Image (tube, grey):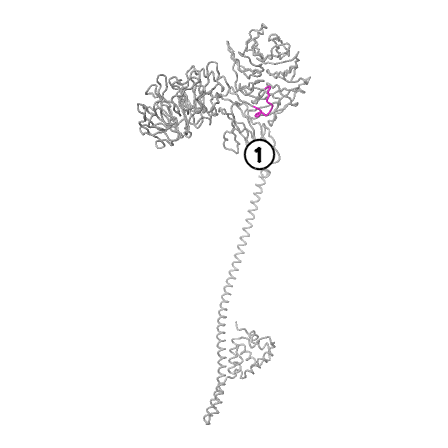
Amino acid sequence: MKLIILNIRFFLFLLLFGSYINCGAQENLIDRLLKQPNVKHFSRKDFNSDAQFWSATEDDFGNIYFGNNDGILIYDGTRWNRVNLPNYSSVRSLVKSIDGKIYAGGYNELGIVETDAYGKYSFLSLKDSLKIEDFNFENVWQSNAIGEYLIFRTFKKLFVLHKNKLTQIPASNIFLKGFVTNNTYYVLDSNEGIFELNLTTGNLIKHLDTTQYNNTSIINIRKPKNSNVLELITENGTLITYNLSTKSTINTTLLFDKPVSKIISYTQLNDKNYLLGTLRDGAFKVSFSKTTTSLTPIYNIQDKTVLNFYKTSDNNVWVLLDNGLDLIDYNNPRTLLCDEGSVYDLLQKDDYFYIATNQGIYYAHIASGNTITPESFKLINGLEGQAWSLQTFENTVLAGHDKGLFKITNETAEEIGNLNSFWKVIPIKEKQHTYIACNYSGLYLLEYKNEKWTFGDKIKGFDESTRDILEADNPYTFWICHGYMGVYRVTLNESLDRAIAIEHFTDQNGFKSPFNINVYRWQKEIVFTTNNGIFSYNRPTNTFKPFDKLNNIVDTTLNTRKILEQGNKTWIVQDDELGYFYTNNDNRTIHKDIFLETKGTFNRGMECILPINENYILTGTHTGLYLYEVKKNASLDIPIKITSIAYATKNETANLPLVNDSIVELPNNTSSIHFKFSSPKMPNGTPNFYSYRLKNRDDLWSGWQSMPFKEYSLLPPGAYTFMVKARNTLGIETQPSTYTFYVLPKWYQTKLAMFLYVMLSLLLIYVTIKLVERKIKRENQKTRDQEQKTNKLLQLELKQLKLEKEQRQIQEDKEHLEQDVIKKSKELANYTMLLVNKKNFFTELQTELKELRSYLKTKTSNNKLTEIFHKLHQHRIDEEYLKVFEDNFETIHKDFFKNLKDASPDLSTRETRLAAFIKMGLTNKEIAPLLNISIRGVETARYRLRKKLDLTTEDRLSIFLESLSPTDL
């Protein structure tokens, strides 16, 4: 079954405690809870050295120095550093002088712990400078400071250092212990007793003989102010009061009512309280009053052998153990009471304190004298598993549990009925002794009769989970919020067996979302918390509207999950952060700084908070049950310190001085710069967080982060200021610490380079201008040349056009001539053929006429025929026709005859005519009539012509003649 997270209603406030837990129970509970401070453990994993510690002191910055078998360990609240003595001996004692120097004593060694400009610690031996006579003084067991005096105790002697002058006071036997009280130094001699050291004279004044304290080991000597009494605490837990005036013992008191192991260490908390450390039984707090002395164990110390204590400037105490370190944090407002599971509800009833967890219900008996510690809580048998609520009705403790509803009596539980899965119980104000039990799947009637609890029937009509329920103003009406389905208003009938009216409200009724809605009463009004602010019911419109009284106080962008009004405070949980505001103040600022450590630890929807009174509140979380002391944090001027600065280049890593009169300059090839920081005076019981900013690079501060270092890479040249501040989970914030540095530019980024760049730029501009001017001139000249060229080209083009025109005309004339030549050639050819045909005709006609003459018998006919011959002879083709032919041929084939004569000057007219006929392509048959010779005669004439023209047998006569005057013009 899917469980829906419960938001517990603390009816114990309303019914059992009124505004708060009743006064007597309140004082009893507070008295029982406040006796145990927070203890923080440190182990080898933290300090990375031997686990045995001997002494401690604190410098002006809040750094804690520890004497350890491996040397001096220095804790700055964040990191551990170690400094070894020259002989690598253990360090038994440490002390801070009035001028802030840290002195350390080891085996045959005494010196100062120094810090150089880079934050690195080192040890400077003073054996030579102080002119110690005998270097074999063995261990410096104790170191104390009184004003300007420093006292170093060894077994053999006391070294008193004052203004760089060392006085050595030898022991008659062995100096076992040294004590400082009220600016007076007392030393315990093993055989002689207790002496007071006169710092001015260096004399020892004896006060007690060893027999006066039974020669037992003295752990501490205390002299109250304005008193002449010494209080001695021995190793067996005896308090001896000694009167210095009468030299007598006033009183002897045993501090422990049962045997404990040997007491070996002591520190004073204040005038009335101090701590004792034992060899095997841990640590105890001793409190004095006028009439009584009380003893309280300090729980949760990780080792039972307490070698020493050191009280810090902020009144916390370091516990130096044989195996580890513990810090008792008296300033932390948060105290862990129980770590048994995740806490859902709380309740005090008489002498019992109960908590409901996911593992079951636990109880702690808080009768007078018992102190509540994590070990005090015991699981109630039968209530193992998920428990939801604890309430008191009818003087009975009722527990809502996954297994059912239970009645708790002191340390035992009894189930009511046999039903499972109950969230809690609410009373019906209209009927006495009548209640409703809220179940995972509806409501059940619950009655108290005859001192017995009994279930009635399940109330019909409503079967949803009733985890979050509040009685409305109307009788028998309830507001029920479902984590996923919105809000229901359910009205029951008077017999409480049926729901007679159910209204369902979602994002259609004024809510922005139906998810994560819870219902509470605040200032007598019913309010509904959501993811988007707080709403109230508007009866006339039957819708929900924003509730401005609270919305003006809370952040409406966050999910408000709880509102609890107690006294003059209103407690809220928003997005897993606890806070409060003063209900009736005009300035309703939400205070949540001291609760920062609870963020993310509440059970969502089931936030468990229980205000005890104005100053204290209990909170139940995933990690357990805590008590908070609600008080204003003092305005502390806590510094944060930059402890180390290193930069890296490609070839090396180097540290930077932490303090410098001038701005530190980094090489121009710096690849990264690394800052480490800490806040030693920040309360060490809570985690620290850091925020940083690099001016000239970051506009805003970074978010809070737990890492105590920051690295920047590849910073551009320029001046930077690194700023860092710290905050702890109590909301205490430091002032920022700053460090200014300058990343040098590369050679090409220097001022000289910039000057050269400017000069080069100016020169470049000048050269560019000149080049541009020259180019302009060239372009102008080029333009002029181009214009001239263009003009020439235009002229040439005009000439070309004219020439082309003339050429076209010539071409046209040529074409015309060619056409004319062709035409004339055709005409010449036709004329030639006509001559040939005519010649042939005349020849044939003469032949026929000659034949006809043979047939004529008469003279008349012969005469007539002779006349015809005569006419034919007159019209024969003679020289006249050939001359016409030659003229026409010469017209067509210019220079043919000239060229022919040039080729062979001795050619006859007949031979030139033969050449012309051959050029025209006439056959021998066609040529013969024109020349009045036979075909054979033509061939002979051709042969002779070839000879005169000197043509070989391979040369063609026609081709040669064609070349003399080509046909194409």
Q: Quadrant of the N terminus?
A: top left
Q: For the residue marked with disc 1, what is the amino acid?
A: Ser
Task: List x then y, in percent, for residue 291.
Answer: 50, 9
Residue 948 lies, with reference to residue 329, above or below; the image says below
Residue 906 lies, with reference to residue 734, above or below; the image says below
Q: Does the magenta segment cover residue 817?
A: no
Q: Which residues are magenta?
A: 43-55
Dot 1: within a 10 Å radius of its alpha carbon, few (fewer than 14), some, or many (20 or more) residues? some
Residue 209 lies, with reference to residue 375, above or below; the image says above
Q: Residue furthest front?
A: 418
Q: Does the magenta segment cover residue 48?
A: yes
Q: Nearer the viewer, residue 897 or 2?
A: 2
Q: How many marks?
A: 1
Task: List x then y, in percent, for residue 687.
Answer: 51, 25
* Residue 105 visible in the picture: yes
Q: Nearer the viewer, residue 174 or 388?
A: 388
Q: Mark 1 — residue?
A: 672
Task: List x then y, in percent, for residue 270.
Answer: 53, 15
Left or right of residue 439: residue 122: right
Q: Nearer the viewer, residue 586 or 684?
A: 684
Task: List x then y, in percent, for residue 277.
Answer: 56, 16
* Residue 613 visible in the picture: no
Q: Nearer the viewer, residue 444 or 821?
A: 444
Q: Residue furthest right?
A: 133
| SS at mark 1 in the image | strand
Residue 325 lies, with reference to residue 671, above or below; the image says above
**Quadrant housing residue 117:** top right
Q: Residue furthest top?
A: 246
Left or right of residue 515: residue 707: right
